[in-house]
Every structure is written in C-alpha cells, then in structure tokens.
Image (spheres, rainbow, N blue to C red):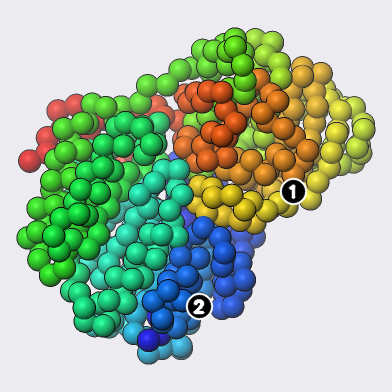
Amino acid sequence: MRLALLGFSHETNTFAPTPTDYQQFEASGIARGDEIVRRYQGSHSTVAGFLEASERFGFDVVPLLYAQTEPSGMITKHAFDRIVGEMLDLLKQNGPWDGVLLANHGAAVSEEYHDADGEIATRVRALVGPEVPIGLALDLHGNMTRRMIENVTVTTFYRTNPHLDPAPRAIECAELIVRTIKGEIHPVQALETPPLVINIVKQFTGEEPMKSVMADCEAVIARPGMLSASVAEGYPYADVPEMGMSFLAVHDGDPLAAREAARWLARRAWERRDQFIGDTPSPTEALKLAASAPRGPVVLMDVGDNIGGGSPADSTILLAEARRLGVRSYLQTLFDPEAVSRCVAAGVGSTLTLRVGAKTDRLHGDPVEVTGRVRLISDGQFEERRPIHGGGRYFNAGTTVVLETTDDHTLVLTSRRIGNTSIEQMYSLGIRPEWKQVVVAKGVVSPRPAYEPIAAQIILVNTPGVTTSDLSFFSYHRRRRPLFPFEQDAAYE
C-alpha cells in the first residue's frame, strides 16, 4: 500500500501589506523527499503524524514535497503556481497511488484563488482520479469550504488551541484513509457553515466558550457509526466568502447521520454566539495590572501583533506605553534586522542609542528610541523538545541580539520573524522569563504552552494591528452577509 505525502501550508492574512512570495517559502524551507523525514520526524507536527501512521498501520509513505512558511500576506500567483505545479508533477511522476495524504492549513489565499486549499484538493483529485482516497489534515483556524470536502475522502482538524494535537489528528486521518483503502469503511462527510465568527480572543479551547463547543464535538464522535467530527474556529483575518466557523461530521456510509450531526454542532454553537464576542483590556489597563500584580511574571498576549496570525512581529505599542508608565522588569521580542545590524556592528558589551521596532508599516506603532547595552549576540537557532503550539522542533530567528536597556527592559531583537511559541527561545539566550515582572508574548493562544507553566497570570491585550481583536478595524469586501456579530440580526435556520 503506497500513500503519497505532500502539503502546502499557509495561513494568509489578506490585510497584511506584504505579499508572500516564492522566496519566503524557500527561506522557510521547501522540503522534498527524504528531507521531509529528516526535518519533521520526531516532531509533533502534521507531517510527523503521517510518518508515524505509516509505521503504525503498515503502509509505505512516499514523501514528495512539503512547503510552509509563517503566516503573512497574500500568496503571489507565481509562488502558488510554482509550488503547486511541482507538487502535482511529483504526484504524477511517482504514481500510481493507493491513497494521498495532504498536510495543508485551510486558510491559504492566493492572488488568484481565495480558496487556495480547495484549489489544491481539486487538482489532486483530478490527477489521481475519483477512486483514490485522499486525506486532508487541517489547522483549527481553517476557513472550511465545500470545495475542499467534495474533493477529498476524509478531513480532520486539530481539536486543540493552542495546537498540541497536529500529529494525533494526522494519525487519525491516515488511519481512516487506510481503512477506506481496505474497504472496511465508507466515509461520507457533511459540512455546516452557520453565519458565525468567533473572535480570536475567545478561541482558547481550554476555557469557555470553546471548551463546551469541543465537548459537543467529542459527543458527536461517540455516536454510533461516526468516524470523525471537527470544529473549525475559522480565520477572521482572511477576507474570503467562507470566513467563519464551520462544523464537519464524517460518518461510515450514512450521509443523513453525518448531516444531522454537523447541524447539531452548528446549532449548539449558534446558541452560544453572544459568548464569542471579544472583550480585552487596552494596553494601558493591561500594563497597569501587570506592573501592580503581587508577583510575576504577568504574561501579556499582544493580540494585535499576533505573529501566528500574520502580523509583522515588530509592534511597539506595548513597549512605548511601558516606557511612558515607567514599567520595569519587562521582556519582549522585536523583529528588527536594522537594529540587529547596528548592535552587531557595535559588539557585545557596547552601549548605544537606537530606534527599535515598527519599521514594517505604520499600523503597529512608531519606532521607539532606547539606550541599552548589547549583552549577547546569537545565531538565533534553537531546538524545542517540549510539546508546543504547532508541534515544531527546530527554530531559526536569524541573528539575534539581547539588548538590556536603561529602563530595565530586556529586548530580544531578531532578524527573522518568529513567534513566541517556545520558551527555549529565551532560555537559549540566557534569559529567565520567570524572573521578570512583565513578559510580552506576541500572540493570542499559541504562546500558552510555552509560558503558562511559569506565568503568575496571563492577560490578553487588545492592541491595534493586522491581527487586532477589534474586527471593526478591517474593511471586508468578500465575506458573507449577514454574518454575526458584524450583523447582529443574522439568522441561522
């Protein structure tokens, strides 16, 4: 039994000004063949789950190509055509296949296709034919489309946010495909997409309202004949017609049972819709709470500079306000290659004054002038063996500088955009976040596995930017109408 493994994974923020080109995918690493195994085996990723499934269920997996890069702006036509074209060429040249495993994201948008994942699924289906089972494993933040499920046999989504289960969901997907190939099951999928958006600050599956939504999902999975069920939280920073929550049920042979289950999940979530509206403090309120807390660290989630959602990683909103308020014992990262170069030129031990951050656009504050001592210069590479959001293991922040400022702030300046999903990012630089009073983590939920174990308190902060929790900030042109909570009178029958 031979199954192809390939994937194109990107979370596209259509409001981010910088497009995602082929060079960005190359810089992140387009893995081919055995390189996929070397890079991902042993991690907690979707690809690792597919590789593990081949050993667990006794099939030959043939890794072809896996392309991914950090969330960012619209994928260029050239990048999409080149990468997907190579994927399909490899699929054709190395066939025939008993099955195909796709490791995508579910919120990819290109200049030509607002449903890029659906376009990929359509092309793969056309190439392998109608009889070959295809498994599609997606991120919980996918904007699910009918075109996706109509062109694959089984779809699974992560069930945790932060994403700690990419590998288990990939194993589940692969097992269902293997059982389909053997003729043991006959999956049928049903998708329900109520007119509903959940604010990004309400998407943590470990607390309400998502805790109950995911409990409903588990209840559906326990039904007789049900093979799988998924809830997609959706990705509100992609202006596409399918943007919003979606509910999927996969049954063994009974389309009516699948449809009823998907609708039950959707109705249950619709009844809770008022709980999905965002409510976070301002930067000033959050910093005052953090600075006056009886013990630290208080971790502030910088929602507007959520790197995992496509932000530039260089927002200075919180840094500027912390300086204005006189907050001390403060730690945060900033993407700033220009400042890194100046610090490297000055050398370790040097003291200099420079303007840091907010150099990508004008949506995330203004550069802040600081004076500080260069304590450390690093190549920015580190390894994380703990389970973390997304399941990554090897990281590269590029040349990295630790700058200790006269304000008692520790600034980690990076030359590559990188999220704060791994505490090893700090430990590898000799920084102990648990010794700080205030720690800024650029994200909403993704930094939780890294920082929750050491945090005295976690506060989400509504900062401006391309991932702000204030969705009224954005001008949508493609989304459905009516859509709750944009239109309060939206109805779901």
Viewer-side residue, 288 vs 322: 288
Residue 409 makes an appearance in the image? yes
Q: Secondary structure at mark 2?
A: strand
Report the disc number at residue 414: none
Which amino acid lies under the numbered mark 1 shown in the image of this protein? Answer: Gly
Q: Position of residue 158 (x, y in %)?
A: 37, 53
Question: Image height check: is 115 above or below 343?
Answer: below
| Residue 319: quadrant of the picture | top right
Report the disc number at residue 380: 1
N-terminal-most mark, 2 or 1:
2
Which amino acid lies under the numbered mark 2 shown in the image of this protein? Answer: Leu
Viewer-side residue, 162 vs 96: 162
Badge 2 crowding class, 10 Å Cα cut-off, few under 14, some 14 to 19, many 20 or more, is many
Residue at image point 64% right, 60% down:
27
**Does the residue at mark 2 contact the one at mark 1 (Cβ under 8 Å)?**
no
Residue under circle 2?
Answer: 64
Q: Is residue 312 left or right of residue 60?
A: right
Residue at image point 90% right, 27% down:
351
Q: Position of residue 257 (x, y in %)?
A: 9, 59
Viewer-side residue, 315 vs 293: 293
